[in-house]
Amino acid sequence: MEIVANSWAEVQEALFRDSWDDRLSRHRSPFIYRGLNLSGHGLETSLQRLGGPYDRLERHLLRNFRKYAHSDDNFGGSTWNWLALAQHHGLPTRLLDWTYSPYVALHFATNELEHFGEDARIWCLNYVDLNQFIPEKLRSVIEKESSNVYTPELLDTVIRTLDELSDFKETFLLFLEPPSIDNRIVNQYALFSMLSKSEALLEDWLHDHPGQFYSIRIPAALKWEIRDKLDQANITERVLFPGLGGLSLWLKRHYSSR
């Protein structure tokens, strides 16, 4: 389902819809978010964007990343730790970045001034309900922990390699919380989605599971207002990308003329 938000108020209403949790009597949203500057961009992974026989390249990419990366005992031998680290540093992987924060997603839908003449989009997934489609062998692990997402340590208790993940007959989606590699991961309130088949397209999979997602289209005419209000709320590159690089990105955009 697509929601077109034509005002700041409509954006807020769409982002926080269905956030009431009867079990807790609290506003705790079951959704995660991904913001895109261009509404026409889909949910392809960086691995899929490589093109060619990308599904056969995945093992080579990760093997060589581990071979040449600086040794770090914190990552040990866990495939999922290394996959998260590789994604974080720009290696093409089957992981897709999401955030628990609707405002962080809104930032990534309005952070590129060169695309302010085009509509943006925010994807919203019900990551809590989507767990019902995970095979019982895996689902029981997070249910035992009263969790809705996997950590690398939890996932290691049932599957340890990409080959084991691909061996499942059905295609399913799971959510992985990365280790706190740096403040960027922490400040962006980040997590990853991962399909069991690297060649599967997330949009196709979602359309086979209706009612578990929606998207918000943000008209180009609304981007400047959203951007200025996010800046006032301190949702900026300076915060989301701690360090001199993020500071420079924020200052460059903040002082650009309309």
Image (cartoon, rainbow, N blue to C red):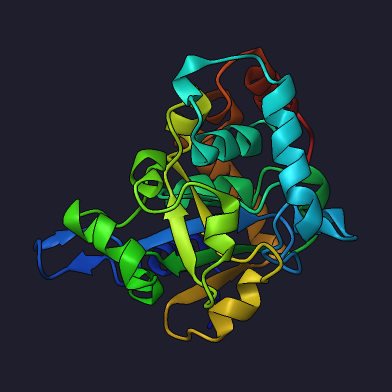
Query: Quadrant location of the C terminus?
Result: top right
Q: Residue at x 76, y 31 (%)?
A: 64
Q: Quadrant of residue 121?
A: bottom right
Is residue 29 in view?
yes
Image vertical order of residue 78 relative to residue 125, above or below: above
Answer with left or right where residue 162 lies relative to residue 150.
right
Answer with left or right where residue 180 lies relative to residue 53.
left
* Residue 70 on image: x %, y %: 65, 14
- In the image shown, does 74 or 97 lie closer to the viewer? 74
Q: Residue at x 76, y 40 (%)?
A: 61
- In the image shown, does 77 or 192 lie closer to the viewer? 77
Q: Residue at x 38, y 63 (%)?
A: 31
Image vertical order of residue 214 relative to residue 86, above or below: below
Answer with left or right where residue 254 lies relative to residue 122.
right
The number of discs equals 0
- In the image shown, does 61 or 182 lie closer to the viewer? 61
* Residue 255 on image: x %, y %: 73, 26
Is residue 128 in view?
no
Q: Residue at x 74, y 60 (%)?
A: 38
| Residue sticking out furthest to the right | 52
* Residue 92 on image: x %, y %: 74, 45
Q: Quadrant of residue 60?
A: top right
* Residue 116 on image: x %, y %: 76, 53
